[in-house]
Amino acid sequence: MPQKGIITLPTPVRFVAAASVGGAEEEAGPLGAFLDVNDVGGDDKFGTSSWEAAEGEMQRRALTTALGKAKLTEHDIDGVFAGDLQNQCVGSNYGLLDFDIPYFGLYGACSTCAEALILSSVYCSGLMTGPVAAVASSHNCAAERQFRYPIEYGGQRAPTAQWTVTGAGAFILSNDAEASLPMITDVLPGRTVDRGINDLNNMGAAMAPAAIDTLKRYFDETGRSPDSFDMIVTGDLGAEGTHILREFMASLGVDISAVHEDCGLLIYDVDGGDKHAGGSGCGCSATVLAASILPRMGLPTVMPAPEGKRLHDVLFMATGALMSPASVWQGNNIPGICHLVHIVGGDA
């Protein structure tokens, strides 16, 4: 029986372009200056009539911007893999409706960005197609009234709760691109992990065991250690999940603290911005990857370049809490998932 482990791409797939979209809270955060698109009106509706419609518009703008950067049109793209947090992925369905591109709708909760990158890179590398796209998004107001309470309710948030990011990221991938561009060399699909967490306000604790499982499997299979990488970045464990991940890995004799970052803690000023345990949502890791990480790996950007050392070897691990409103109302546990994408900087 073949091992359910790392998939090494037959042909490395490179990032040709990436684009990020953020709302008012994201623009005010540490990465705000690096976002390609923000909501000029400031109401996070992006010119639409509802927050749900706004999420679709964010995806449309993200993909349009990425295509423009890549100097490609929709007719050059052989497939788009996209997902969001809304029921039946309507943000992606409606947002990308007018693009003449074969469409794959995905739901991996907050891990959707990595799931989309895994599937699109394997599709592009294995089938030797033309360029493909991966898109992921979330909207704070749409997600809150779907999974918890409408914003107008004014419910008090627990200290372990995370703030759903209003953001989107879009990525154009190609198996035939300049060697100077960052590339995906291998991926590790995650396994669902259930450790009995059923607290809707502590998703970091629900997702951390999956991150532990994926990272341990990757180290075991490759024989590599944390100091082999410039950064190991998790999707959005937030403060609670980050503490669990680091502490548990340390108990296994693996100290990741020197190279580990979390997108949920990078996108907001957690201490001064009243974001409790940090950011979450499909748009969290997608926005951080597009706006901050890939530009530091050599991907050209029209926005100011993020500060920090040049990154060459990165493990991008987006985590997700696989729940629905019905599953939580019925008292079910919240399984977690963590997909891993190994990204290596270009040759230049």
Image: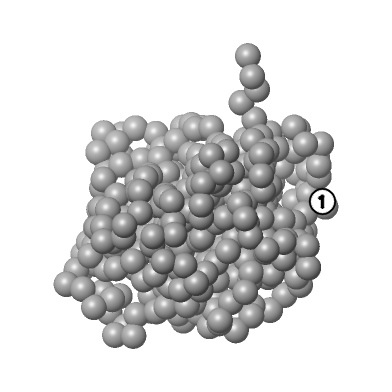
- Residue bearing mark 1: 228
Q: Is residue 239 visible?
A: no
Count the numbered circles shown: 1
Residue visible at 33% across and 66% down?
A: 60
Residue extending furthest top?
A: 1
Nearer-the-camera pick, 188 or 194: 188
Q: Is residue 27 visible?
A: yes
Residue visible at 66% across and 34% down?
A: 6
Residue 250's spot in the image, x, y percent?
Answer: 75, 44
Residue visible at 66% across and 55% down?
A: 183
Residue visible at 47% across and 67% down?
A: 72
Q: Is residue 177 depicted above or below 188 in this figure?
A: below
Residue 197's spot in the image, x, y percent?
Answer: 45, 37
Which quadrant of the rendered structure holds the C terminus? bottom right
* Left or right: 139 as drawn, with respect to 326: right
* Left or right: 104 as drawn, with respect to 191: left
Q: How are the residues colored?
A: one colour
Which quadrant of the rendered structure holds the N terminus? top right
- Tell me the element at label 1: helix
Q: Is residue 221 depicted above or below 17 in this figure?
A: above
* Left or right: 51 as drawn, with respect to 225: left
Q: Is residue 55 depicted above or below 271 in this figure?
A: above
Residue 212's spot in the image, x, y percent?
Answer: 63, 40
User: In the image, what residue type sits under mark 1?
Assistant: Ser
Which quarter of the picture shows residue 291?
Answer: bottom right
Residue 17's spot in the image, x, y percent?
Answer: 55, 67
Residue extending furthest left?
A: 49
How crowded pointer 1 is (Cα within 10 Å; few <14, some 14-19, many 20+) is rated as few
Nearer-the-camera pick, 7 or 330: 7
Which quarter of the picture shows residue 331?
Answer: top left
